[in-house]
Amino acid sequence: MKIEAKAVEALLSGSLILNGVDLEAGDRELVGVIGPNGSGKSTLLKCIYRVLKPTAGAVYLDGRALESYPYKESARRIAVVAQHNYYNFDFSVKDVALMGRAPHKRALDRDTAEDFRIVAESLETVGMAAFADRSFSTLSGGEQQRVILARALAQRTPCLILDEPTNHLDIKYQLQLMDLVRGLDRTVIAAVHDLNIAAMYCDRLYAVKDGRVVGQGSPEELLTPEFIREVYEVDAQIMTGMDGALHILFHPGAVRNKKREIF
Amino acid sequence: MGSDAVKRGLLRGKPLYAVTVLALLIILPLSILAAVTFGTMRLPMAEVYRVIQYELGSIFLRLPIPEEWAPGTPIHDVVWLIRLPRLVLAAAVGAGLSISGVVMQAIVKNPLADPYILGISSGASLGATVAVMLGIGITLGPNYVGIMAFAGAFCVSIAVIALANAGGRATSVKLLLAGSALSAVCGAFSSFIIYVAHDDHSTSKIVNWTMGSLAAANWENNAAILAVALAGTLFFLTQHRTLNLMLLGDESAITLGTDLHRWRVAYLVVSSLLVGFSVYNAGVIGFVGLVVPHGARMLFGTDHRKLIPISALAGAVFLVWADVLCRTILPGNEMPIGILTSILGAPVFIYLMARKKYGFGGGD
């Protein structure tokens, strides 16, 4: 399923957060959105997953305006792992994952054996099956993040949106989660903080700064030292590892100055 | 007992849930039948049940009632016209207030919510006072006092949520302040109307009301509140998924396919109906909507699929026995039931407030 954002503008309490953003994620493509803090990444994703209504422009799913879908319909097509998932309640892990089945249910429908199978499978996929009966609020941030991913998987949608999914995770789980997402074979749009993760896993990247797309392309095309300096205002060196993967090394100002002193 | 077990609910995920619902379904009618035998007038148990047996036979099978048990005899009137209606009322009010407590707690995402604490009962009380003392709304038909009570409850529900959300997200502190402020406003207006009206009969009726009393129960009014309580409970039984989503908040709910906004309004209407009719028939009975759902969460967790039926049934049983206690605790006199539930419920409220975190389901 193809997701397109066309000329999306978003005005939040008087300031223009997104200023005409175009983005396209083709069928089963993993698209990364990168950019410094406050660039509008999250706002863009929120417009795509319907929590924010664009002030101008629109989002399309396979060519049909997202707005024309009832919420239930869009939730059967796009699942979301958002940034903040702190809840003031004590559901069990299984209960939380089961909520992923909600878009497929009408008020009087019962939860079927099929639903429970899908939930168990989703928890298995994210490695949280052993935690099914634990209380969600007692889990660590990373574990909660994985449960929310399981909930999104239980929605069985063709598209997935991830807003900085690796934020709370140890490096092992960062890689595990991205491996998992990579293997899903769905259309994925992910805001990614870590450029190395973005370079390693994404098919294509969009760089957002000050509410505009300032560059797009494959990680190899986009991530050059010049471009990183322009967007992030840091010096970086790009290396290709033995596995052919892109690695970005940063040279912070302090280190650079120290080197100058020595040499 | 690990704190994690308490958080999830001690009995959640066990077949005990089904057993508990079944047990409560049996306990409720048994409780009512047992409670009929308690009272200031000592009546032999066998005679009490004979009255009920003949009345039910007459209603459902059109059997004649023998002379000595017929309407007009003291034993018939005490059992069938005084005690039984008030117990049925107690059950309906208990279920209605518990359910509306559960729903209010989901709407404001805070387990401290309760129709009494949020001032909704006061709103209902004001609506009913206006109707009784000033005759406003008399054109609405025979149940106009109940309808006015509902209108009062609904206005206060909306106002509390609007007030608590003014200038940023609602927090529990703002909710409680908004509730007590509106409760004070409604209480003051009710008192003012009573004071100005100078009608001794209505005044004493309304004073009874503010303390909660089931004594005025009769079958005609019971029909209305039973219908409302039953319909409200059935409605919310179908809403467990949306109620669960409410606890996740608006954004998560949208990504899971539900726009909460219109549901919130619908739930406020139905829970205001429950509170309005409860207050109209039994006055202000506080803390039922707080204590019963809290107990249910401690045992079965936060999932509304279980919480709604357990709370409704447990609330009904709770109020039936609370009424028995009210009728027997003071020799030769009756204690207003609102006072009893406050004595029992206020400490629970204080305990919940004193805890740092307001977790749903027991907390840490």
Image (cartoon, coloured by chain):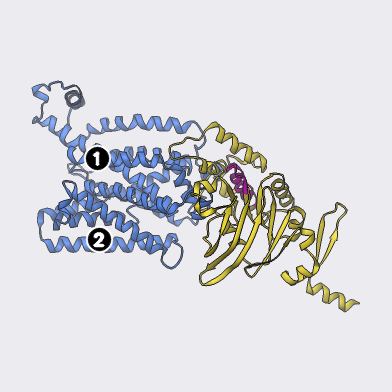
User: Label 1 crowding class (10 Å Cα cut-off): few <14, some 14-19, many 20+?
Assistant: many
Q: Residue at horizontal 82%, vertical 72%?
A: A255
The percent position of residue A230, horizontal first and vertical second, equals 74, 72
Q: Quadrant of residue B198?
A: bottom left
Q: Is residue A246 left or right of residue B50?
A: right
Q: Chain of mark 1?
A: B
Q: What secondary structure prevails in the magenta region?
A: helix
* Residue B191 belongs to magenta span: no
* Alpha carbons under labels 1 and 2: distance apart: 24 Å
Give x and y (percent) for residue B118: 35, 56
Q: In the structure shown, which secondary structural element does the residue marked by tag 2 occupy? A: helix
Asked whether residue A157 is drawn in magenta, I would say yes
Q: Colour of chain A?
A: yellow
Amino acid at the residue labelled 2: Gly
Q: Residue under circle 1?
A: B89
**Circle 1: element type:** helix
Mark 1 is on which residue type? Leu
- State which quadrant residue B96 falls in: top left
Residue at mark 2: chain: B
- Asked if marks 1 and 2 touch (Cβ < 8 Å), the reply is no
Magenta extent: A142-159
Of labels 1 and 2, earlier in sequence is: 1
Which residue appears at 54% of the width and 51% of the height?
B255
**Residue B187 image label:** 2
The blue-tinted chain is: B
